[in-house]
Image (cartoon, helix red, strand yellow):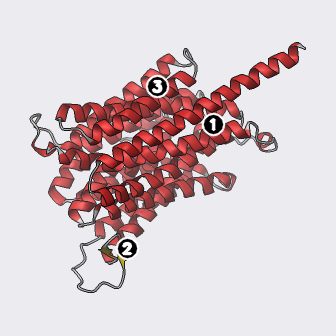
């Protein structure tokens, strides 16, 4: 894009979008990456899930570490370095080759030889995870300094998913079909490289040092919130990592619609984000936060067993939509609840880190379950459990908050 045209538009918006794109690109493309590594690099299901968990874990840890030291960084430079590392990580995965069979491997991982294929892929995903984590920290630090951050974040969320969704329905499937796993990683590297050109437009954060001196409030409620979100994230990471594999069990590649499975996932995801985030924006706090959170967790949890037992193409597409829609409907209310607990945003920042850490365990746990049970149905019941527990925890949190408010009102009245 012509840089003069960018300057005539909203430069901050393009900078923030670039950072958000690098931060979430490989995570949102995880179903296609898992499928590519299984088919192209001959990884078993457990190791494919482990690779996804490694990347999510590195993203989470990098984000948490950099966020604590954010004052030491220039955010545009941090975003650029994140983009460079993500690009190099995807190039490393592109260079990965299928190792020859060894009759007597020295080491094995989940029943598969620990050869150069697994090692090189793990190195590439680790590097990409560090880059994504740095970009996410740069994005989080920058978004706080813009005018109307809530509205801008909502717009960026939808735009980012539309860009990634278009990549998942056009660029990645075409390259994947032609060049297997290398096509998928080529697409990711190309998008990282394109985003680098716009990182310089990231705004500079204004830091509030007075807020750092205030003690952290509402520790019980905040702990319930971040733990419940991390448990939900385990189920979300599990189903997202293997949603493409579930579709293949119903022979989606030969469906009557004449479109690829990856295209169906991409279109359902884009629609789910727009509907979920849009509904949250329209409803706002009309029904408070308790009811919307409860409904979103209920829909997400019930969709788990239904998807894992799905036999219809239309039902599969609808359930993928329900997963994404309920997830993006839930996020604004979780973040709003976290922000209410601490005006400096520390609980909100902790929620983001804990969500990423929870997502780290999902793919690996799901891979192990599938390996043990030889069935995707176990993942569906796992999703139901990781939705029911947060429903109970959030109910306890909101009930406690209501009791606290009544106590404070009575104390003031007396």
- Residue marked by disc 3: 295
Q: Name the residue: 29% across, 70% down.
A: 96
Classify 82 as above or below 4.
Answer: below
- Residue marked by disc 1: 145
- 366 left or right of 56? left
- Residue at disc 3, secondary structure: helix
| Precedes in sequence: disc 2 or disc 1 | 2
Residue at the farthest right position: 414
- Residue marked by disc 2: 119
| Precedes in sequence: disc 2 or disc 3 | 2
* Residue 333 percent across, percent down from the top left: 55, 29
* Residue 178 percent across, percent down from the top left: 15, 56
The quarter of the image holding the N terminus is: top left
Alpha carbon of mark 2 to alpha carbon of mark 1: how far?
40 Å
* Residue 232 percent across, percent down from the top left: 49, 42
* Residue 47 percent across, percent down from the top left: 34, 64
Rendered image quadrant of residue 91: bottom left
Rendered image quadrant of residue 21: top left
- Give the number of the disc on residue 176: none
- Residue at disc 2, secondary structure: helix
- 197 left or right of 393? left
């Amino acid at each position: 894009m012509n840089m003069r045209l960018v300057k005539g538009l909203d430069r901050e918006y393009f900078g923030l979008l670039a950072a958000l794109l690098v931060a979430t690109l490989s995570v949102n493309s995880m179903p296609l990456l898992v499928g590519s590594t299984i088919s192209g690099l001959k990884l078993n299901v457990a190791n494919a899930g482990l690779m996804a968990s490694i990347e999510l874990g590195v993203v989470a840890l990098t984000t948490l570490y950099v966020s604590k030291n954010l004052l030491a960084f220039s955010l545009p430079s941090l975003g650029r370095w994140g983009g460079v590392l993500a690009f190099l990580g995807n190039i490393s995965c592109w260079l990965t080759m299928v190792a020859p069979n060894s009759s007597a491997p020295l080491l094995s991982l989940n029943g598969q030889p620990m050869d150069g294929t697994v090692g090189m892929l793990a190195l590439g995903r680790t590097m990409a995870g560090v880059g994504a984590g740095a970009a996410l920290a740069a994005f989080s630090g920058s978004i706080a300094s813009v005018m109307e951050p809530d509205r801008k974040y909502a717009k960026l969320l939808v735009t980012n998913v539309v860009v990634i969704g278009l990549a998942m329905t056009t660029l990645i499937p075409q390259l994947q079909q032609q060049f297997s796993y290398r096509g998928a990683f080529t697409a990711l590297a190309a998008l990282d490289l394109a985003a680098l050109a716009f990182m310089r437009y990231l705004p500079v954060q204004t830091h509030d040092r007075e807020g750092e001196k205030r003690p952290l409030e509402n520790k019980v409620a905040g702990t319930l919130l971040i733990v419940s979100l991390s448990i939900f994230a385990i189920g979300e990471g599990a189903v997202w990592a293997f949603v493409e594999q579930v579709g293949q069990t119903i022979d989606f590649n030969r469906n009557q619609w004449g479109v690829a499975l990856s295209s169906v996932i991409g279109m359902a995801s884009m629609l789910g984000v727009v509907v979920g985030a849009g509904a949250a924006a329209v409803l706002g706090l009309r029904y408070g936060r308790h009811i919307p959170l409860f409904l979103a967790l209920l829909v997400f949890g019930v969709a788990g067993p239904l998807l894992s037992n799905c036999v219809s193409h239309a039902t599969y597409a609808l359930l993928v939509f329900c997963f994404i829609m309920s997830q993006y409907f839930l996020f604004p209310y979780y973040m709003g609840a976290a922000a209410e607990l601490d005006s400096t945003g520390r609980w909100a920042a902790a929620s983001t880190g804990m969500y990423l850490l929870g997502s780290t365990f999902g793919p690996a746990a799901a891979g192990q379950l599938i390996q043990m049970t030889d069935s995707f149905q176990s993942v569906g019941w796992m999703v139901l459990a990781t939705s029911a527990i947060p429903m109970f925890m959030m109910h306890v949190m909101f009930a406690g908050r209501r009791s606290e408010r009544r106590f404070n009102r009575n104390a003031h009245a007396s």
